[in-house]
Image (cartoon, rainbow, N blue to C red):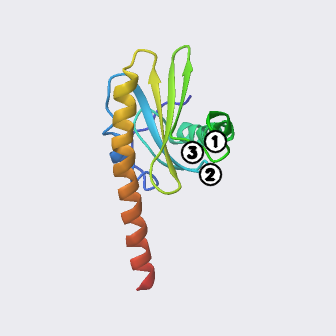
Amino acid sequence: MTTPNTVNDSSNKLGWLLEDLSVPGVRFAVLLSDDGLRIAHSAGISRDDAERFAAAASGLRSLGKALGEFCGGPQTGIRQNVTEYDDGMIFITAAGDGALLGVSTTAEIDVSLIAHRMNELAARVGTELGSMSHRRADSDRR
């Protein structure tokens, strides 16, 4: 991984929202599209690494969807992916229409607290993305 750059660039307009996920053990958060494009990222990860994370997280989400049929049937929806590694965890959850929130943590975390805070943040992000779409549509009409 490269050194995180915390400079606000014009492509990270929603990065400030992700800073609200300051929970002990959280390394960083990335907001991404369903198809794996980075929308925003928090401090703690560089833009290049956030783009790589977004692509990988989207792939992991797709695998989770494919496995859903083994948890009740082919139409079983996915709520959250959680993958545990030796040195931490990756969480991925829906964050509005066509968006996902991915979070990397250390191994020493409160899983229920992280999941709860992610769900709160995902709801806020979804609202913000929706309002950005409305503002963009309004400006296109002018």
Residue 9 spot, x, y in % from top left: 42, 51
Question: According to the image, label 2 marks what residue?
Answer: 35
Callout 2 amino acid: Asp
Would residue 30 be found to the left or right of residue 109 on screen? right
Residue 79 spot, x, y in % from top left: 50, 40
Q: Are marks 1 and 3 in contact (CB under 8 Å)?
A: no
Furthest residue toward front: 72
Question: According to the image, label 3 marks what residue?
Answer: 77
Tell me the crowding category of disc 3: few under 14, some 14 to 19, or many 20 or more residues within 10 angstroms, Cα based: some
Callout 1 amino acid: Lys
- The C terminus sits in image quarter: bottom left
The alpha-carbon separation of the residues under discs 1 and 2 comes to 13 Å
Which dot, 2 or 3, sits closer to the camera?
3
Residue 108 spot, x, y in % from top left: 41, 15
Q: Label 2's element?
A: loop
Q: Residue at x 62, y 34 (%)?
A: 71
Callout 3 amino acid: Gly
The alpha-carbon separation of the residues under discs 2 and 3 comes to 17 Å
Q: Label 1's element?
A: helix
- Mark with earlier residue (2, 3): 2
Q: Are marks 2 and 3 in contact (CB under 8 Å)?
A: no
Question: According to the image, label 1 marks what residue?
Answer: 65
Q: Residue at x 36, y 49 (%)?
A: 123
Which dot, 1 or 2, sits closer to the camera?
1
Q: Image quadrant of residue 65?
A: top right
- The N terminus sits in image quarter: top right
The alpha-carbon separation of the residues under discs 1 and 3 comes to 7 Å
Residue 98 spot, x, y in % from top left: 53, 55
Q: Is residue 82 above or below residue 30?
A: above
Would residue 49 be found to the left or right of residue 128 on screen? right
